Amino acid sequence: MESRAKAMGHGIHPMLIVFPLGLLATSVIFDILYLITDRTGFQISAAYTIAAGVIGGLVAAMFGLIDWRAIPSGTRAKRIGAVHGIGNVIVVALFAASWLIRLASDNWEPNAAALACSFLGIVLSGGTAWLGGELVERLGISVSDNANVNAPSSLRRAPARGA
């Protein structure tokens, strides 16, 4: 099934997700640099990139929900899409919590809880990104109206040719 929310012929959700994912990953890099160097600019940069990433994630989620609602019920694609979406809501919530913890500190300084939320969020985002790839690459969601919404997992081995 093709994406239901499009701009200039392309799905909006896949176009938007690169921004929050990149911003949130960059915030973790800034946190690591802050931990290594203890330079204040990195902690402030992390806070601002988290804020932009959370906002971008919420915008991308709206278009993802529009596409998910169009997936046929009772299919593998619908289940994977649900886990992908819920997982990403958790990712955004973890980063939002990290931002709120920093907001309560002096000069956006991240404490252990703020860092744990961010680091856990970026690890979880790797899994949810893989699920998004499974939806598009394996199942054809947002690509074709002839999508195979019940294709087996890409982690399964394909039978050998000629076997």
Image: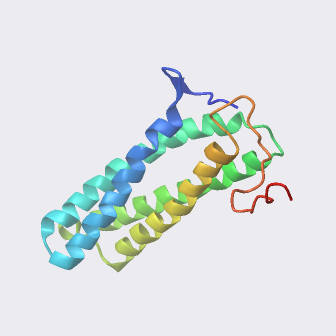
Is 40 placed left or right of 101 in the picture?
Answer: left
Q: Residue at x 57, y 27 (%)?
A: 5
Q: In the rendering, at what x and y percent does residue 65 appear?
A: 61, 39
Q: Nearer the viewer, residue 111 or 122?
A: 122
Question: Could one spot residue 148 in this view of the protein?
Answer: yes
Q: In the rendering, at what x and y percent does residue 89 appear?
A: 54, 54
Q: Nearer the viewer, residue 123 or 65?
A: 123
Q: Residue at x 63, y 33 (%)?
A: 143
Q: Residue at x 37, y 65 (%)?
A: 98
Is 64 placed left or right of 100 in the picture?
Answer: right
Q: Nearer the viewer, residue 56 or 131?
A: 131
- Indicate the colouring scheme: rainbow
Q: In the rendering, at what x and y percent does residue 125 appear?
A: 50, 60
Question: Could one spot residue 54 in this view of the protein?
Answer: no
Q: In the rendering, at what x and y percent does residue 91 appear?
A: 50, 59
**Farthest right residue in view:** 163
Is 81 placed left or right of 24 in the picture?
Answer: right
Q: Residue at x 86, y 59 (%)?
A: 163
Q: Nearer the viewer, residue 141 or 81?
A: 141
The answer to whether 37 is drawn above or below residue 6 in the figure is below
**Farthest top residue in view:** 8
Give the quadrant of the N terminus.
top right
The answer to whether 104 is drawn above or below residue 150 in the figure is below
The answer to whether 68 is drawn above or below residue 38 in the figure is above
